[in-house]
Image (spheres, helix red, strand yellow):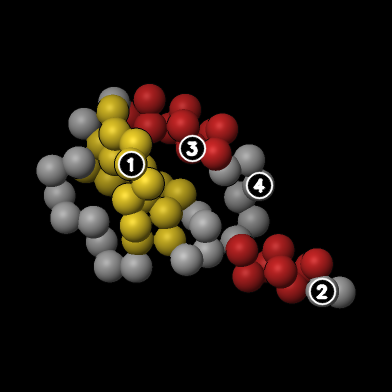
Amino acid sequence: MFKVVVNHEEQHSIWPRDRETPAGWTEVGVTGSKEECLEYIRGAWPDITPLSVRRALAGS
């Protein structure tokens, strides 16, 4: 079983549910099989560009 985590750049990842969330990442409250978590990520994170890059591009 896995959990979905997100970092300050709004990048998403999966992490084993029974392991401590790594520093710099926050749980989003979604847990399940690997495929269930990846399916959530596909819907929640359609633009994989890091937040800082999106902001820089918006300011140009």
Relative to 29, say whether 6 is above or below.
below
Whether residue 26 sits left or right of residue 12 in the image: it is left
User: Separation of disc 3 and disc 1 at Cα?
Assistant: 12 Å
Marks 3 and 1, the one that precedes in the sequence: 1
Q: Which residue is mark 4?
A: 47
Element at label 2: loop
Marks 1 and 2, the one that precedes in the sequence: 1
Q: Which residue is mark 1?
A: 29
Relative to 39, say whether 30 is above or below.
below
Q: Which residue is mark 3?
A: 41
Kind of residue sitting beneath label 4: Asp
Q: Residues within 10 Å of mark 1 (few under 14, many from 20)?
A: few
Image mark for residue 16: none
Q: Nearer the viewer, mark 1 or mark 2?
A: 1
User: Separation of disc 1 and disc 2 at Cα?
Assistant: 32 Å
Element at label 1: strand
**Residue contact at pointers 3 and 4, CB within 8 angstroms:** no
Q: Nearer the viewer, mark 4 or mark 1?
A: 1
**Quadrant that contains the N terminus:** top left
Kind of residue sitting beneath label 1: Gly
Q: Residues within 10 Å of mark 4 (few under 14, many from 20)?
A: few
Kind of residue sitting beneath label 2: Gly
Element at label 3: helix
User: Separation of disc 2 and disc 3 at Cα?
Assistant: 27 Å
Residue farthest along the left direction in this orientation: 18
Marks 4 and 1, the one that precedes in the sequence: 1
Whether residue 52 sits left or right of residue 58 in the image: it is left
Element at label 4: loop
The percent position of residue 38, horizontal first and vertical second, equals 43, 32
